Image (cartoon, helix red, strand yellow):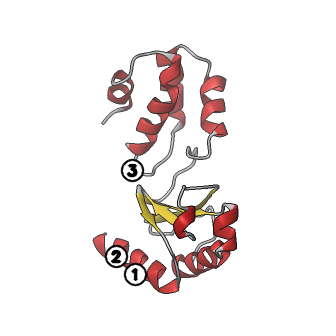
Amino acid sequence: MSTQNILEKHAPERHNILMILHDLQDHHPQNYLTEEALEATARYLKLTKASVYGVAGYYTMFSLKPRGRHIIRVCVSAVCELKKSESVIAHLESTLGIKTGQTTPCGLFTLELSECIGQCHEAPSMMIGQAVYNNLDAERIREVIESIRNQG
């Protein structure tokens, strides 16, 4: 879907900026907001480029650089930290061969941290795309990553 088609799905009103940015990012194969998309959004909403960049830069769910096809978000809230989220991060970094904030060379995974994903009752937790994985340990992480790799 083109940038213009995505923009036209939304009324050209300032309050739609978050929905537009999510839609643009979700439809980009590298899960990020391009400079062209941000500039088109500014023109469409009759805002300055700085205003649109400010919104995109403020919210951690938006990225201004290319990411992997699957975004892994590990919860690092206080509850998840108590439940050893740091071991989840270490295991993911080892399994994927990347550090937090990086993308695998094949472009399949990007590893990010999230302040809270609302799964305190089953911590430690992570999200991959819209799927939530709870009660994580090394074996569960390995299974999830292998399953996604096998899907392509």
Residue at left 40%, top 81%? 143
Mark 1 residue type: Glu
Going by the image, does 130 lie left or right of 63?
left
Q: The residue tagged with tag 2: helix, strand or loop?
A: helix
Q: Which label belongs to residue 147?
A: 2
Task: Name the residue nearer the viewer: 33 or 81.
Answer: 81
Residue 4: x and y, percent? Answer: 36, 26
Q: Which of the two discs, 3 and 2, labels the residue nearer the N terminus?
A: 3
Residue 111: x and y, percent? Answer: 56, 64
Residue for badge 1: 143
Mark 2 residue type: Ser
Give the foreground label among 1 and 3.
1
Q: Which of the two discs, 1 and 3, labels the residue nearer the N terminus?
A: 3
Residue for badge 3: 29
Report if residue 120 is visible in the image.
yes
* Disc 3 and disc 2 in contact, CB within 8 angstroms: no
Mark 3 residue type: Pro
Q: The residue tagged with tag 1: helix, strand or loop?
A: helix
Quadrant assignment for the C terminus: bottom left
* Disc 2 and disc 1 in contact, CB within 8 angstroms: yes
Mark 3 and mark 2: Cα distance apart in space? 20 Å
Residue 109: x and y, percent? Answer: 47, 65
Task: Name the residue nearer the viewer: 138 or 71.
Answer: 138
Mark 1 and mark 3: Cα distance apart in space? 25 Å
Mark 2 and mark 1: Cα distance apart in space? 6 Å
Q: Check the image and report above or below for 89 versus 110.
A: below
Report if residue 103 is visible in the image.
no
* Disc 1 and disc 3 in contact, CB within 8 angstroms: no
